Image: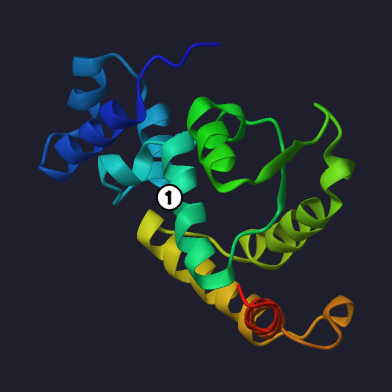
């Protein structure tokens, strides 16, 4: 079913009411019920248009920029396993991987178990962070999620990583790789 009003329009209606337009008049003027108005106010109240409009999936170019930043911190893997999203299958990603000699391994469509590590992480993230908080704005969500990410990576040791935190494990791998390159004379 197609939505009658966009998130941007809804935020505009809420701003009109905040500016003093009576709710009944606003509903009559734009053709929606007062029930819709109060539902929208509970969902979008206090948001700007950029907060209310759902974030679109990242395209390939922004994803490659993120990978470039991560490469500076962690080094470049030989293989990258991803799902079949447009951002991972598009020209920008394929070109980026080819230029760096990186092998892309895509899971089969509908087979998330082929990328079990990320599925496990997604479940943990959902249970421990997203389901535990009621975000009042996009900015609030960013702060809470960043706090959770830091705690997960910097403070919580993992058995699978030999009792190290993910950050400490990544630093250990980076040190080993750099030592191996120096030893090999690269």
Q: Kindly tell me whether residue 150 is visible in this rendering.
A: yes
Q: Quadrant of the C terminus?
A: bottom right
Where does label 1 land, which residue?
65
Quarter occupied by residue 159: bottom right
Q: Is residue 4 above or below residue 176?
A: above
Say which residue appears at 18% left-offset and 40% top-offset. Answer: 15
Horizontal side of residue 102 vs 44, given as left or right: right
Say which residue appears at 23% left-offset and 31% top-offset. Answer: 13
Say which residue appears at 76% left-offset and 54% top-offset. Answer: 118
Q: Give the farthest residue toward the front.
A: 185
Horizontal side of residue 63 vs 113, given as left or right: left
Q: Quadrant of the N terminus?
A: top right
Residue 47 screen position, x and y as percent: 30, 48
Residue 86 screen position, x and y as percent: 57, 28
In this view of the protein, which residue sits in the foreground, 72 or 2? 72
Give the image's coloring scheme. Answer: rainbow
Residue 175 screen position, x and y as percent: 65, 84
Say which residue appears at 48% left-offset and 67% top-offset. Answer: 72
Circle 1 sits in a helix, a strand or a loop, which is it?
helix
Q: Kindly tell me whether residue 137 is visible in this rendering.
A: no
Residue 144 screen position, x and y as percent: 50, 70
Horizontal side of residue 153 vs 27, given as left or right: right
Q: How many marks?
A: 1
């Amino acid at each position: 079913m197609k939505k009658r009003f966009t998130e941007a329009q809804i935020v505009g209606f809420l701003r009109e009411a905040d500016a003093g337009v009576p709710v009944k008049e606003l509903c009559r003027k734009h053709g929606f019920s007062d029930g819709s108005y109060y539902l929208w106010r509970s969902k979008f109240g206090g948001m700007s248009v950029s907060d209310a409009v759902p974030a679109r999936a990242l395209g390939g170019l922004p994803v490659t920029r993120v990978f470039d930043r991560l490469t500076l911190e962690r080094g470049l893997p030989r293989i990258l396993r991803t799902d079949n999203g447009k951002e991972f299958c598009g020209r920008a990603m394929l070109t980026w991987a080819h230029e760096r000699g990186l092998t892309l391994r895509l899971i089969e469509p509908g087979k998330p178990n082929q990328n079990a590590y990320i599925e496990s992480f997604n479940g943990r993230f959902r249970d421990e962070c997203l389901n535990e908080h009621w975000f009042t704005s996009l900015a609030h969500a960013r702060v809470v999620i960043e706090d959770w990410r830091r705690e997960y990576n910097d403070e919580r040791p993992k058995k699978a990583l030999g009792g190290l935190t993910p950050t400490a494990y990544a630093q250990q791998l980076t040190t080993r790789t750099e030592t191996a390159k120096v030893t090999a004379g690269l």
